[in-house]
């Protein structure tokens, strides 16, 4: 009777343990998959630690090569001053790749919410089919300003816009230079000096590749779960065979 009483107890533990392992594995895999999908959304708004980015009030339309571009933005907390403005040019080389060039236009802005770019797009190269954007960041950054923040925050970011050539403007060819495209290059983080051109490569997947990434994650998750179930079944069978012996 003692042997009969112990066997159901062992069988119950054997049945519950694999399912607990399966649930734990599922939660772990989902935890790994969901952040990976979230990172591919392309959302680069810096809202960590309660920071609400400012917005440019400039229209960024009818921007012409060689002319001045007056920019202005909403309120930015003075604790981030002095401010720096970085310009970036993005040139697509293929469907899912782009080259970018970034340069700091100014690094000592204080007590102001406006700035004029004297000669667009200098010192960046002019790209007829390129996209441009402006970013405002703290010129000097230390961890005491925002505890727990390792990256220099983006305080304001313009939409992507195009620049009309001087020749086209002289011929009266009007082109809407604003663009809401979210594709482009990520910040290089190496443009430390004003006027220093910093090239970089962007290989971030866009468009259909994001769907492919999601499908790949789903297939990988299903395969991992299937393998886990097979291992659990083998474990149960081996234990039952051991009990019979």
Image (spheres, rainbow, N blue to C red):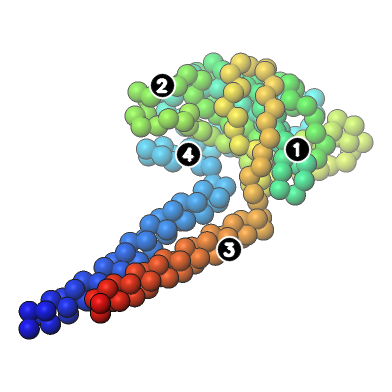
Q: Is residue 83 left or right of residue 20?
A: right
Q: CA distance from mark 3 to mark 4?
A: 28 Å
Query: Helix, strand, or loop for circle 1?
Result: strand
Residue linked to disc 1: 91
Label 2: few (<14), some (14–19) or many (≥20) C-alpha neighbours in 10 Å: few
Residue linked to disc 2: 142
Residues under numbered marks 3 and 2 in contact, where contact means CB atoms less than 8 Å apart: no
For marks 4 and 1 on the same chain, the one whose residue lies earlier in the sequence: 4
Residue depth check, mark 3 versus mark 2: number of the one nearer the observer: 3
* Res. 132 image quadrant: top right
Q: Quadrant of the N terminus?
A: bottom left
Q: Residue furthest left?
A: 1
Label 3: few (<14), some (14–19) or many (≥20) C-alpha neighbours in 10 Å: few
Which disc, if any, is residue 69? none
Q: Position of residue 89 (x, y in %)?
A: 71, 33
Residue linked to disc 3: 215
Query: Helix, strand, or loop for circle 3?
Result: helix
User: Compared to 47, does 122 lie above or below?
Assistant: above
Residue depth check, mark 4 versus mark 1: number of the one nearer the observer: 1
Q: CA distance from mark 1 to mark 3?
A: 29 Å
Q: CA distance from mark 3 to mark 2?
A: 40 Å
Query: Helix, strand, or loop for circle 4?
Result: loop
Q: Position of residue 184 (x, y in %)?
A: 66, 41
The answer to whether residue 187 is seen in the rendering is yes
* Res. 15 image quadrant: bottom left
Q: CA distance from mark 4 to mark 1?
A: 24 Å
User: Compared to 37, does 112 lie above or below?
Assistant: above
For marks 3 and 2 on the same chain, the one whose residue lies earlier in the sequence: 2
Q: Which residue appears at 75% of the width and 42% of the height?
A: 92
Q: CA distance from mark 4 to mark 2?
A: 16 Å
Q: Is residue 49 left or right of residue 6?
A: right
Residue linked to disc 4: 46
């Amino acid at each position: 009777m003692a042997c009969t009483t112990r066997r159901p107890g062992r069988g119950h533990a054997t049945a519950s343990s694999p399912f607990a392992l399966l649930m734990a594995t599922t939660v772990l895999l989902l935890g790994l998959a969901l952040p990976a999908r979230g990172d591919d959304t392309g959302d680069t708004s810096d809202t960590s630690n309660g920071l609400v980015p400012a917005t440019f009030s400039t229209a960024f339309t009818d921007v012409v090569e060689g002319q001045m571009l007056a920019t202005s933005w909403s309120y930015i907390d003075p604790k981030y001053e002095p401010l720096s403005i970085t310009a970036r040019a993005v040139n697509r080389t293929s469907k899912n790749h782009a080259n970018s060039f970034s340069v700091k236009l100014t690094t000592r802005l204080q007590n102001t919410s406006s700035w004029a770019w004297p000669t667009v797009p200098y010192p960046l190269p002019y790209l007829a089919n390129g996209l441009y954007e402006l970013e405002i960041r703290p010129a000097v950054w230390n961890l005491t300003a925002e505890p727990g923040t390792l990256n220099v925050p983006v305080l304001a970011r313009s939409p992507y816009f195009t620049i009309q050539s001087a020749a086209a403007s002289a011929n009266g060819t009007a082109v809407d230079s604003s663009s809401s495209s979210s594709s482009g290059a990520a910040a290089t983080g190496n443009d430390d000096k004003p006027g220093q051109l910093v090239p970089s490569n962007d290989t971030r997947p866009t468009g259909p590749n994001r769907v492919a990434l999601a499908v790949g994650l789903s297939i990988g998750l299903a395969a991992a779960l299937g393998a886990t179930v097979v291992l659990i079944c083998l474990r149960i069978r081996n234990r039952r065979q051991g009990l019979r012996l």
